Structure formats: C-alpha cells, structure tokens
Amino acid sequence: MCGIVGYCGKEPAAPIILEGLKCLEYRGYDSAGIASICDGEMLVKKDAGKIDEVERKQGIGCLPGNIAIGHTRWATHGAVTQANAHPHSDCHGRLAVVHNGIIENYQQLRQELIDRGHHFTSETDSEVIPHLIAEKMEGDSYSLEKAVLAVMPRLEGSYAFVTLAIDDPGKIVGARKNNPLVVGSGSHGNYIGSDALAFARHTRKAISLGDNEVVVMTPDKAEFFDAAGNAFSKQPRELDENWANNCKDGYEHFTLKEIMEQPCAIDRAALQDGKKFNSIALDILRAGQVVFTACGTSRYAALVGRYLFSRVGKKFSEVANASEFGYFVDSIDKNTVVIAVSQSGETADVIEGVWAARDVGAKIVSIINRPNSMLEELSHHTIYLKCGPEVGVAATKTFLSQVAVFYLLSFSLVNAFDEAVEHLGDMSGKVAEAIECNNSNLINLAQKLKDKNDFYYLGRGINFSIATEGALKLKEVAYVHAEGMPAGELKHGTLALIEQGTPVVVVCPDDYTYGETLSNAMEAKSRRAYIIGVSDRESDIFDFWVEVPRVDELLYPMVTIVPLQLLAYHMALARGYNPDKPRNLAKSVTVK
Ligand code: G6P
C-alpha cells in the first residue's frame, strides 16, 4: 500500500530509486514519482500510471543527482492524477516528501496551514507533511531532522515518510509510525525503503526503523533518534539470500513463476525448528481458546489450519476475519492464543487486532513471509514461511507454505513434528505432478469458460477452504464473480443462481467427504450447471475432470489448490488481463 524508496551515496540516485520502486510495485501501482537534489536544485518528476508508463512519459529514472526519494502509489485520499502522485512539496518547492499511510487529522492540519497562507496543489492527506516541515525549517531555522521530530506529534494516524530538502542537503530523513521503513547500508551508500526488497540487490544489511523513531541518512552513515531526539544505535540484520531474487526467471508473469515455485516452497516451509514448534504447540494446547486472525488468502489458509488443529490435535479453534476481530476483543484474554497469519506481516487489519489482543494479555503467534515486519515485533513467537519474495499481487506460493506450516503445527500438537516433516518430504513431487498434469488442459478450459460471468466453488471439510481460495484467485486476477462455499450450503440459497452452463468447481478428492460433496454437485448438475471436478477419482457427474495426484487426506489442499491457481491465471490471460497487477488491489494493505 504505497512503496517508498530513498538513496544517498556515490552513485546516480534516480536509477537506483526506479529499480527499487519496481520491486515495490506490489504495494501499489496507480502513480509514481521521484525527487532528487542536484546542484542545489530540487527536481521532481511524477505522473499517474504504472511505473513503466511514468518512466516512459516523464523519464523519472534520468533525474540527475546522488540523492533521491521515490514513491509508487495506491490511492486512498485523492484520485489517481499527476497532482496527487508523490513526491509532494512545500509552497516553495524546497523540500520533497513521500508518504505511506493515512494522516487522519489532515483536514484540520490543512485548514490551519491554509489559514497561515500555504497553498496546496493536491487532494492528498500526505501534502500536509512537507508544509508542516517547511514551516519549522523556515520559521525556526530547524535542521531537517529537528523539523521532522517537531512535526511527528502533530500527525495522527499512520505513516512512514522520507524527506529531503535543499536547505539541509546531503541527507534523507525518514520517520515511522505503524507503517514499515527499513534502512540498508551498503558500500556505495545508504538506502531506505518500505521493504528491504527495494534495495536487496545492493545490500543485505537491513535495519528496521521502529515506531516513532527517526533515521538520518547521509552517504556514509545512518543515525537513529528516538522521539525526544536522543541518538541510539541499531544493529543490522542479514537478509536471507533468497530474499534478493526478484526476477521473473524467464516466466511471463510473477504469478506463473510463483505457482511453479510451489514444489520448492513446500521443502523450504518444512525447514522449521521442531523445538520451537513444540513450544508453540504447548501454548496452543494449554490455551482456553485459539483464534486465527487474517485477511484474504491468509484467512483461507487459516481455515485449513483450523481444520487440521481439530482433526489432528482435537483442538477447536476459530478463524476471525481480521477486520472484524477487533470487535470481539471483549472475549479475548490471557488464556487466548491468537495466531496471526499474514504474508506481509503488515496488513493494518491484522496489526490492529493483534495490538488489541496483546493489550488484554493474549499470546501472539505469527506466521509471516516477509522479514522485518511490524507483526513480528508484536509477536511472542514468529514462524517464517521462507518461500522468498512473492511479487504477484494474488498470493499463491505463500498460501501453500502457510498450509505446510499448519500441517507441521497440527502434528506438533500430538508431538509428531518429525513425522509431519517426513510426510511433507513427498509433497513437492506431488505438487509438481499436479502442475504438469493440468497446465495445458486448463489453458483450454479457460478458453472455453472465459466469457462466463459467475463461478461457484464447492467443498466440504478441509476442501471448503480450497473452494474459497480458488474462488478468490479467480476474482482477483480474472475479474470474474466467484463464490466459494461449503458444498452443503449450496441448497440454502445460492442454488437459485445456477442455470444452464454455470461453471461449478467441485473440490472433491477421494476422502470421506467425496460422496456427500458429489450429491451437492448433482444438485447443481440437475439445474444444468457445468461441473468441473477437482479430484483424484473420476465421476460421471464431472463435465471436466481436473485430475490431481492421490495423497493422504490431510495433504489434499496442497494438490487441489494448484490447478485452481492455474485456472485463474489462464482465465486472466484469456480475458486479456495482467494477472500480476490486478486493478484496484495491492498486495500489502496497510490501511484499515
Ligand atoms: C491483500 C492482498 C491479498 C492478501 C491480503 C492479506 O488484500 O490483495 O492477496 O491475501 O491482503 O495479506 P497478508 O499480507 O496479510 O497475507
């Protein structure tokens, strides 16, 4: 949800910023811009459009100078226009700011500033920041960092912003509250970004800025200050090598690359510390209640987790929609374990619920992919998925990795972590088989169904989660209305929508739900639906059979989700859309 990058050092800055912005495009791609300082002049170029378009139109990557900041936007306040694109400046164009987050009291601040003679050029909440900083620098002759520290208490809401000014040149100042900002130090200069991915090609030494902290970055050093302006030191953490690979590796899209990486992702997710899992399992077993909180794909993975906890560990748990979780905090207490599932570790809805649960003493276990996240800071235990950066906005390999982690965790509840690792050992081959057997058939199926407007996905038990995730993938990347539901629910309303040729995807591997799920599929077939069966066992009911390898009942989600991801991907292509960057969506949603 908006990506920020900054660099100061010996190299031309704009190309580094441009490259960093491309790595952060998953956070938003409505508009982009860069500001640099060269020969005492502030140069700003920005426009609406994806980064490549903005680069073509404005040549943002050609701005001169060795110090620059940049931004890729996902609009919250103000339409997608050139004026609303970042960086934003003060009245005299002497400083520039890029911001991620929402300044909740911006209307009040803006009015105050207008009353004092400031002129605004955008509709954004962000623009108040450069005006406030400029006032402090001009009126009180503050340094850039002193002005930032003075302005921070005035800003309500959430922010990560970085700024540079021609009146205090040679430095970039960054500040954060409830939004991520990571500093990287390399031999050719210093970097800052919303995610270490922005600079991972240049340095793997990363330091996360904490809430209400400020960093002052020059070509040679990065200094940290608390809200009172006291300097303190922070140690860098070495980024996993895997995290620096951000290329398509010859695939047409990141989404396809990430689907294809899933056999390997399972192996990586299984590389976990058994002792840590056993200790988390003890907390879960002792807890009076266990609640998963998550959004989107991560929530559907949590549904698999809930099923596995019940079936393997005989432990009942509940899955809360993270944006609703906060409303149930009255029933959370110190006997609650909250399992926060978030690929990014920064989804605002998840973070807010976790804060509330922590406040009442709940134990927080988080399951995260991206390193250095806010969620990790709030958690008592963190489990990493280890599958490397996921760039496609629609989650694929992280879903499978989350499912693998839940498999390990559920077996840990019965002290069988090692057994689970062994079972997972066979799964990468099975997932590869599920890809190979289906890819070309699904291209044909997508061609056949590309003009259908509504899809329904059914499943029971553990397969219900896959029905919901399969439907979400189709909505996200192919813009087709799709609903995933427990197969038994179909007759309680949705059946009224089934007509001749309506595609109904039935997730029905050969487990103990097979027969009943097929009966529900038959209810749809009797209304002339077109039945796509996802199973290792064929049936006359299927109009199209997506064959998956036979595996143990609890591992079916890993082989059934893969063809549904591929179907969504090929549907997107058949309908002429770019699956990597779905309209209106961002991968990391840092606003509520
Ligand atoms: C956004 C993305 C979804 C994602 C969800 C949760 O809505 O578009 O693809 O599943 O956030 O993200 P998280 O990082 O918390 O797993």
Image (spheres, helix red, strand yellow):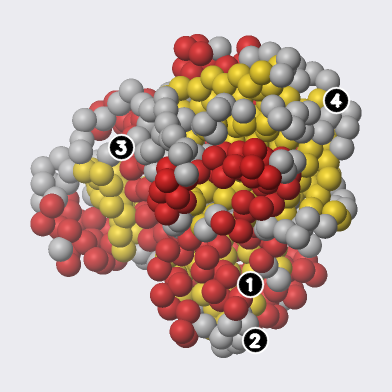
Q: Is mark 1 within 8 Å of ligand 1?
A: no
Q: Which mark is residue 62?
A: none
Question: Which mark sits nearer the N-terminus, 4 or 1?
Answer: 4
Q: Residues within 10 Å of mark 4 (few under 14, many from 20)?
A: some
Question: Which mark sits nearer the N-terminus, 3 or 1?
Answer: 1
> Between residues 210 and 392, which one lies in front from this camera angle?
210
Residue at (87, 37) in percent of width and height = 221
**Of labels 4 and 2, the one closer to you:** 4
Disc 4 residue type (three-letter): His
Q: Which mark is residue 286?
A: 2
Label 3, label 1: how many angstroms apart (C-alpha)?
35 Å
Disc 2 residue type (three-letter): Arg
Label 4, label 3: how many angstroms apart (C-alpha)?
44 Å
Question: Which mark sits nearer the N-terminus, 4 or 2?
Answer: 4
Q: Is residue 201 left or right of residue 87?
A: right
Label 2, label 1: how many angstroms apart (C-alpha)?
14 Å
Location of residue 137 (image quadrant): top right
- Kindly identify which residue carries mark 1: 364
Q: Residues within 10 Å of mark 2 (few under 14, many from 20)?
A: few
Disc 3 residue type (three-letter): Tyr
Q: Position of residue 522 (x, y in %)?
A: 19, 56
Q: Position of residue 264 (x, y in %)?
A: 66, 41
Q: Is residue 223 left or right of residue 330?
A: right
* Element type where label 2 sits in the image: helix
Q: Position of residue 491 (x, y in %)?
A: 17, 64
- Kindly identify which residue carries mark 4: 188
Disc 1 residue type (three-letter): Ile
Do the CB atoms of the residues marked 3 and 1 lie less than 8 Å apart? no
